[in-house]
Image (spheres, rainbow, N blue to C red):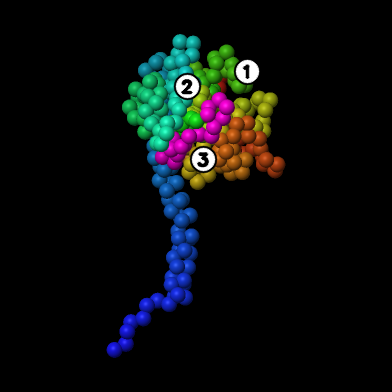
Amino acid sequence: MRTKKGFTLIELLVVISIIALLVAILMPALNSARQQATGAVCLANCKSLSLAWNMYQDDNEGQIIMGHTDDWNGFKPWVYYSNSVAAAGQPSLEPKFDAIRRGLLYKYTQSVEVYNCPGDKRSLKPSAATSDSPALLGGYRSYSIPGGLFGVDTAGAWGIVPITKMSEIKTPSEKYAFIEEMDGRGDNMGSWVVYPLGSHTTNSWIDPIAIWHNKQSTLGFCDGHAEMHKWVEQSTLDMALSQSFYQTLYSGEDGTDLQYMKRGYAFRSLY
């Protein structure tokens, strides 16, 4: 009787090579599918936040919610800034959740999960240490309100005088109320600001954006809808990856991404 022979070393190496090749081919597709899935949840989150933002102004005679993250001049914010310190091991997110619940918008959402994009993993590790924040828990809240929507001083700041009433927003379907932000200071602090069209600074961002969806970000708009926007310039992608402030355009770029955000940045007037 002939005995059954096993695989030779060469045959095993061939099989392993084929498996490795298949994994290399499939991984990008799997990553893309995962990002599409998180993008769908993020899109639903932004829509929910935008609708809640609209419900607030409906209940308050057209006064829009304050877009900053701390009490100011008698106004309470849509959400509070949480600078919670990371503990040993897995840090608790409860201070982040409490900061969301105490904000005025929570009444209209009743869910802390709506404030987090599933692609945002900052909360799983401390943010980069700085002299001001030696060991801060990375942010859980993924979204910010732009400064032009009652997110800066009503007397004027960052180049603009902000809008405080819904009636002041022209073409609300083209003006965003929520943006994915990746602030490295423990949480998304304040509002998201950029110098507007018509200002003296034309080739530089101020605050970073977040890109968790295959070179795309989610935006929630003043009319209640949400959409994904694809970024096309390398400086934009690098800014998001490094959480850099005051990112300038690279040589040869025409500012397509930056100009898009400036066109959708609502404000009352230049300052």
Which SS class for mark 3? loop
Vertical arrangement, residue 258 with respect to residue 82, above or below: below
| Residue occupying the point 56% across, 33% down | 208
| Residue occupying the point 36% across, 81% down | 5
Q: Mark 1 points at which residue?
A: 271
Q: In which quarter of the image is residue 15?
A: bottom left
Mark 1 → mark 2, Cα distance in angstroms: 22 Å
Q: Nearer the viewer, residue 68 or 6?
A: 6
Quadrant assignment for the N terminus: bottom left
Q: Do the residues bearing badges 1 and 2 touch, measured as CB atoms within 8 Å?
A: no
Q: Name the residue under label 2.
A: 69
Does any portion of residue 85 appear in the rendered image?
Answer: yes
Which comes before the other along the chain, label 1 or label 2? Answer: 2
- In the image, residue 126 lies in the stretch drawn in magenta: yes
Quadrant assignment for the C terminus: top right
Q: Select label 3 or label 1 by which is in front.
A: 3
Which comes before the other along the chain, label 2 or label 3? Answer: 2
Tell me the kind of residue under disc 2.
Thr
Q: Mark 3 points at which residue?
A: 211
The percent coordinates of residue 250 (x first, y second) are: 67, 40
Does any portion of residue 183 appear in the rendered image?
Answer: no
Looking at the rendering, the stretch of residues picked out in magenta corresponds to 118-134
| Residue occupying the point 40% across, 23% down | 99
Q: How crowded is mark 1: few (under 14 residues within 10 Å), some or many (20 or more)?
A: few
- In the image, residue 107 lies in the stretch drawn in magenta: no
Which numbered tag is attached to residue 129?
none
